[in-house]
Image: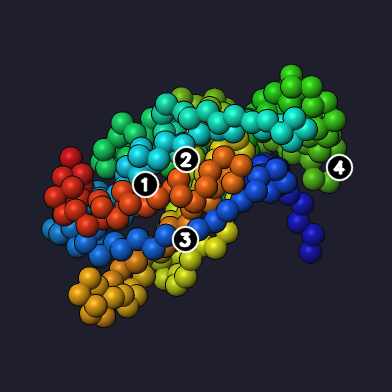
Amino acid sequence: MTEYFDISRKIIANMTSEGWKTIPHVCIVYDANASLLMDVLQSYNRGRASDEKISFNSVILRILIEGIKVCPKMNGHIKFSPWLVSGKVTTLEHIDISLPITYGDGKMTTINLPRMEEKSVHEIQATVAAFRARIESTYMDRVLYRTGLEDTFCELRKGNIPKAVGRLLGAKLGPGRVRIDKRKSAEREDRLKPENIKQGSITVSNMGSLHKQWKGSCTILEIIPPQLCALAVGAVQKRAVVDEEDRICAARIVPITIAFDHRALDTAELVPFMQTLDRVLQDRAWLEREISL
């Protein structure tokens, strides 16, 4: 059986291919001890209705944002010319999270969660839930097609004529051409718009939510240019660890993969990020306050 790329797969293939061709990736895995976080979260959720409970995903995203705040270079875009061997990094003012979300029959899109540095755990959860509801009200192929056209015109304005023409031909010709069902194209106020799926400042993929029994870590992760970093959160898993008194005990570990662009960042520059996660994950008062806000 031969299956041609649909519009969703075309966009993913194009973005990831560009990233691997241009970015020297470095990936490290940070094992976060989430034992205290899980205890605090379970205590908060105990006895609450399902729609009042706070998800682990919302809290871990809030914690990652706290780490990004102290390592602002992670939240930047790069511009580099290999011909001139010159480049610059622009640290962005707001933390706009690119969050991959599955929809429909297993397709994936990436939504842009803006200004996440300003949001509490409850606001983060409400924001993600609202976007999921909007996806259900949206004919995603149409939004992806419009976004692809805007990117193609952007390439034309940059003078990348062969690349832009190739995109147009690929969308309009051959067995893999994009087909938009006009019957599903009605405008709705609650639908996603192209700006909702455009590039953010850093990508966070919650891979653990796809398979909660997953044992292991994501060992490599693509960075989408011009971003400098991507994070992948694995599933919570019980592991034997050695505590500060050299005793072996069970802990709930969340592997977090950090991929970064080696042109702009070195591993040492990510130490404040990991130290911040270490600190807040062992701070019961901070966790209780953030979850209850």
**Within the image, what quadrant is residue 171 found in?**
top right
Q: Residue furthest top?
A: 157
Q: Earlier in the sequence, mark 2 or mark 3?
A: 3
Q: Which residue is mark 1?
A: 272
- Mark 1 closeness class: few <14, some 14–19, many ≥20 residues within 10 Å: some
**Helix, strand or loop status at disc 3:** strand
Q: Residue 188 appears at what percent x and percent y?
A: 49, 26
- Mark 4 closeness class: few <14, some 14–19, many ≥20 residues within 10 Å: few
| Residue 29 badge | 3
Dots 4 and 2: beta carbons under 8 Å?
no
Q: Which residue is mark 2?
A: 74
The three-letter amino acid code for the residue at tag 2 is Met
The three-letter amino acid code for the residue at tag 4 is Gly
| Residue 76 badge | none
Evaluate whether residue 205 shows in this view.
Answer: no
The residue at 26%/38% (across/down) is 120
Q: Nearer the viewer, mark 1 or mark 2?
A: 1
Q: Is residue 215 left or right of residue 84?
A: left
**Helix, strand or loop status at disc 2:** helix
Dots 1 and 2: beta carbons under 8 Å?
no
Evaluate whether residue 40 shows in this view.
Answer: yes
Q: Residue 20 appears at what percent x and percent y?
A: 68, 48
The three-letter amino acid code for the residue at tag 1 is Pro
The three-letter amino acid code for the residue at tag 3 is Val
Q: Is residue 88 left or right of residue 67?
A: right
Dots 4 and 1: beta carbons under 8 Å?
no
**Helix, strand or loop status at disc 1:** helix
Dots 4 and 3: beta carbons under 8 Å?
no
Q: Which residue is mark 4?
A: 174
Q: Residue furthest bottom?
A: 248
Which residue occupies the foreground of this view, 204 or 91? 91
